[in-house]
Amino acid sequence: MMKLAKTILLTGVIGLTFGSLMAQTQQRGAVTDQEFVIRKDRVLTVPVQPRMYEKLPTLPKPTGLNEYNYLVSSYPLNIKPLDLKAEPSQKVYTPQRLDLYPGYVRAGYGNYASPLIEARYMGIDIADFNYSLQLNHQSFGKGPVLGEESKESHTNLGFDGSYFTDFFEVFGGLSWNQDSYQFYGEDPNFLLDENGRFTGFESNVLQAIEVKAGIRELEKVGPFYYEGQLSFRTFSDSYLVKENQVGLEASGTYRVTEDWSGKLGLSYFSTKPEDLNYALTRTYFAIRPSVSYQYEAFNFTAGVNLVSENDSLENKSSDFHVFPVLKAEYQFAEEFGFFAELSGDVQRNTYYSFVNENPYLGPSDQLLNTIQNYKVEAGIEGQFNGAFSYRGAITMSRYNQLYFFVNNYTNNLVTSDSARFSLVYDDKTTVFNINAELGYKFSDLYTLNSRLDLYQYDLSTQAEAWNRPTWELRVNNQITPIARLIVQANLNLMGGLKARGNDLSDIFRESGPFEVVKLKTIADLQFKADYGITDRISVFAEGNNIFNATNMRWLNYPVRGIQFIGGASFKF
């Protein structure tokens, strides 16, 4: 009955639908009469498929032989072994071709009548021999005191060459340096002739010629590496100072394994200085063996410094010195690491090194090396994501004969000289230093490097740490805002300087208490910009002492005020 009802209902729906379509068709003038036959007693019959209950038969397992017997016959052949020669695969790599310019010239001019010339040329045409020539000159026709009376100039000319073989390099060089200064630190009122006219400041020209030659291994990745150099230097000034030096330096490194290595350093110098009050022959010989061990992020170095020097000093116990060298560092992670050091050494001092630090040095009574009895240092360092880097350390050092520069003030107006400096030494000095470094790099757009140093001096014979700072801050910035443009902004600060002033004793005493002159904080802001117009031509501009401060590194010697210089460079 249910099937019949569904059939009737379905037939009715189909009929209504078809009737509606027919009505629409009739309206359009199509078929008008239709007849349908419905059979309800028709039965569909499907044949029955018989089901199989019989299982498939199991096939028998194959049987194989239990034992295998083979007949092996020997056939000896008299054939030579094959000789194989291993050769590296020859693949031709096509490197990117770069336009190399062996020559470079840079020239500029600024206020204070200051021309600037730099020239370099490198010869690379010969396969086994390279050489280079350098010329640098910068002068200041006018200075901070009385214009031309405080002028200054610097000139350097040099040659370097290297000859390469398959295993080592033979190198050498020749350089000539000339620096000219005026002793403008003297009161001009003391330099008047009988007619009351200014006679001018005295000048001093420092000249040095140096020749060097050496040999070093090229393959630094092998188990053994060596390097040696022989040098000769002669130095003189406009007065009585002469100093000749012969030096020999050599070093060798041997890597036993990837973790262990040993190093041996040798240095010998014979120096013959001459001045108003002495003519000496000073020798310095040092042997520095050490062993290093590296295990993952841990590095350790142990060694000894053996130094012999013949400085003449009252109550000197021995010319031979022995100092331990212990260094360790461990990088816990990229962001944090620890390092420590315990060492000692002899700092070699010469008149040439002194005058490079203070060009207004006059006649000296004695030249002494500085003995560093020990140095204890500990600190931390690390970096973050290759962008930020930091380093901080605390150092305590103990010195004998630590040197200082003081003005030649005396209680005698005839011999007192405010323009020249002399050397004084402190017998036993302890120096505490706290330093911190911070760096940041943002791709190639911006780079920051900075360092802060704090010093404290514990002296024994000197009243003050003359002309040595108690703090220093250096901040260097480099910006590349657009392609071909490089901008630098550098800030240098130095404070806590104290100079030795007038002798406060009367003329009947040989020497007495001196006036302590506190120098102002030195603040030097520098700007530099370089823009490459093409690959060969660029222009530059530099500015020094932007604050236009009356900085005074040495007593009675103010530096130049704000200074600008501009020019261009060319490659060829």
Image (cartoon, helix red, strand yellow):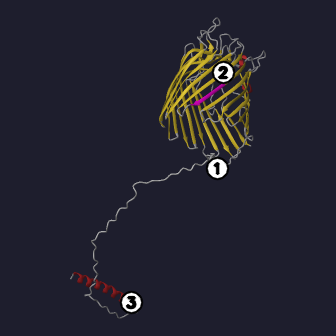
User: Where does label 3 land, which residue?
Assistant: 25
Q: Quadrant of residue 12?
A: bottom left
Front: mark 2 or 3? 2
Secondary structure of the magenta portion, mostly? strand
Residue labelled with disc 2: 268
Task: Judge whether residue 247 can be spotted in this image.
Answer: yes
* Circle nearer the viewer, 2 or 1: 1
Residue 206 horizontal side relative to residue 53, left or right: right
Where, by quadrant of the figure, is residue 565 drawn?
A: top right
Q: Which residue is mark 1?
A: 91
Query: Which structural element holds mark 3?
Result: helix
Classed neighbour count for the residue bearing mark 3: other residues with Cα under 10 Å, few (<14), some (14–19), many (≥20): few
| Rendering coords of residue 206 (x, y %) | 73, 23
Q: In the rendering, at what x and y percent does residue 560 appear?
A: 67, 29
Residue type at mark 3 is Thr
Nearer-N-terminus badge (1/3) = 3
Task: Locate the N terminus and report the quarter of the image it occupies.
Answer: bottom left
**Residue contact between numbered discs 2 and 1, judged by CB atoms under 8 Å:** no
Quick one: which residue is furthest to the right in this view?
A: 195
**Which residues lie in the magenta part?**
249-255
The three-letter code of the residue at mark 2 reads Tyr
Of the numbered discs in the image, which one, if any, rests on residue 429? Answer: none
